[in-house]
Image: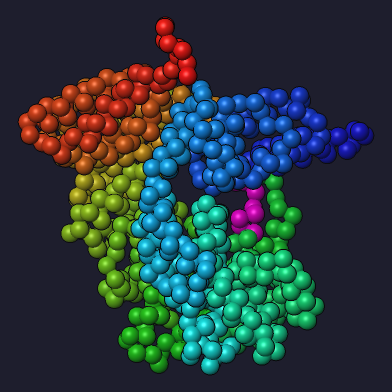
Amino acid sequence: MAKKKARKVDRTIEKLLRTGRYWEWLKEVESQHREAQYAQEYAEVWKSLVRKALRDPRSFQEFCEEVKVVKHPPNSQDVDFLMTLAGFIDGKRSVEDLAALKGLGQPAETLRQRALSWKDDWASLERMRKDLRVFMVQPQKVTARYYEQAGLHFAVPGFRETAALMAEDIAAVRRLNSKSGVEKGWKVVHFFELNEIDASLAEGMAIYPQTLYRILIHPFVWNMAVLMERLSKEGNSASMAKLVRNIPFLFRQAAGDKAETILEALRAIHPEAMADASAAQLEAEIDSARFEEKVILLDRLRGRLREKSQAAQDPLDEIFGELEEDEEETEKLHEAFRRLFQKILNEIEQRSKEIGPRDERELRRVMDQMLVKDIDLLIDAPDRSYDMARLFSRLAAARCLGKRMGLFALIVAAATRSTTLQSSAQEALDRSAPVTGEDLHWVLEKSPMLHFPQLGVLKPLLDRFREDGELLGLILRGLLSELWEFVFISTFAMDPMGMHSKRGKKTDPKVERILQGLRQESAGLKNYTEFHLIPAFLECFKGGTYTQESFLQWLSYLRENCEHYLSFVEDELQHLAGWKAGEENLFLMMAGLTVSVEGAVLTVFKFLKEHSDDWVMADIRVLERLVDNMLAFKPLLKKDTGVLVRMGAVLQKRFDAGEREVAPLMETVKLTLKEIAYPERRVGRRKGKKRP
């Protein structure tokens, strides 16, 4: 191989590795026969891919697909287990094959036990057999009720919520083929709505078992096939091209092997409807389009930008200075999206002057849902608060400020000191449905560039919920989470190998400036319920870094000053679990992450053990959540079983005193201690007896 070509190959391989595109990296290394050259990286990459597959359903599905084309997967028990599990799910491997595997690690063993327990759920699945038969044999009869029943019967994480959405969507799709829908012809087709349904269904294919999911979406596919067959007889090929363009997932499911043939024919007749226009073409189309066409065009643009976002490289690219080749075109598409949205907003503003109160409420609801999805596309830079203020002011003028946008606008108004926008935001919230914890979580997640470290901009939000302790508590926990992350990252910035064992390290000037700003801002929040915890947190971690001493000081402050301090300890364990889960994505950059997280978790265990008397009067639900979070660190519980032993003893006392509700948790603790003490029990031969 020529030196120039070899260097190019090396650069490609190294780029794939540092950007986290591990499956592509493996294929490239194998195709170039570089396994020996990258032996250490090869082992680390496989370790990371296996970890993800054992913990995340999407990563597991990706593993099952990608491992098929890898020539030489490593000879490891966990890889064998994942391949056996994939075969078991597809029906190609038996329960006996799965049970025969030995020496698995804890994550793999947990997955295996769950898989083996599926046979116990067979009776439940059998009850669903008749309903599932209707999905395949009589799809025209499937109504929302069938999806609601499916959501109750299948114990797959998150599926109940998905089934509820499918129940709503099937009602909309069935209307297309109703008697009135047939009479209306193309007028019954709303491209925007169908595109949203299609995108939602496509997401499910990447999450749930495909065999089951194909059965569940069959009524959607059947209805779309009937619709397209009927409308094709009208000879309106331009509208058919738009329909196919807006339902790519359902179209391919319905058309099957004929999909490409149909697509080629439509591209030949209507290339403008089927092709992805360039940014320049879109600009021209924006100016000439009618309002309804603008809405459809906005949806197409949204889809293209989402596709580009999903295909984007790992954030490490920015760190290492790598840029996408079509970055300039993508930015032009962003500009076109924002300009198109402004034009649509102008027309909505004109039309909103003539609508009644009921239609106005519906407009706010629909726009709020759309903006929740599009806000990242509309805001060029999250820290440019005055640009955001102009956007929210326009939304207010068009009567499009809904619940979440109203919350966001309240923060933007405080950041820009706009009393007019603040008043508009308050009015919008007064007219909207009650704010929930999910709403607050969303707005805090979207606005950190505005409120951190300028915590004072949250005061209008805090004043609005001053009498609602639950919502105030959610805001407080969100801010503590941000502080926790800031201090933890600062720790690694000063010492990449982990937490400092002693105080006295010189604080980075940038970190010190942020800390100083946080102290000043937090002083003005003390009068809100429990917000004294923020200055207390900053006092415990004065240097902006974690140490065992500062961590224990923080835990002690929580215990002395919070009535329900154990719930805050829960939060600490959840934070640490989050860092631990992200370890495999950062192993090339943070070598000391594991040591640091494990040290912090053991510190929590030690603290809990020393104050086990607090559990005697604690709410059992708090203890259940606490134990659940502790069980996320089973390997560390092996190093310090004392905390579980103490928990078991306290629960036994409460049980003996007549508290029968502690029994399930007590049993969980006992089983965990037994599992830790006897992780694997081998069945060997006994003297005098022959193995059957």
Pick whichever, 522 or 342, lies toward us: 342
Q: Residue at x 35, y 69 (%)?
A: 403
Of all residues shown, which one is farthest toward the left? Answer: 657
Q: Residue at x 69, y 46 (%)?
A: 322
Q: Residue at x 74, y 39 (%)?
A: 27
The picture places residue 286, in percent across and down from the top left corner, at 64, 80
The picture places residue 82, in percent across and down from the top left corner, at 56, 36
What segment carries the magenta color?
308-315
180 vs 86, left or right, is left
The picture places residue 91, in percent across and down from the top left corner, at 56, 45
Per the image, is 470 magenta?
Answer: no
Residue 405 in the image: above or below residue 659: below
Pick whichever, 71 or 486, lies toward us: 71
Of all residues shown, which one is farthest toward the right? Answer: 2
Numbered label tally:
0
Residue 37 in the image: above or below residue 249: above
Residue 669 appears in view:
yes
Residue 281: name its quadrant: bottom right
Residue 341 appears in view:
no
Pick whichever, 407 or 41, lies toward us: 41
272 vs 638, left or right, is right
Q: Quadrant of the N terminus?
A: top right
Residue 102 in the image: above or below residue 152: above
Pick whichever, 84 or 659, lies toward us: 84
The picture places residue 449, in percent across and down from the top left corner, at 45, 53
Q: Residue at x 30, y 20 (%)?
A: 641
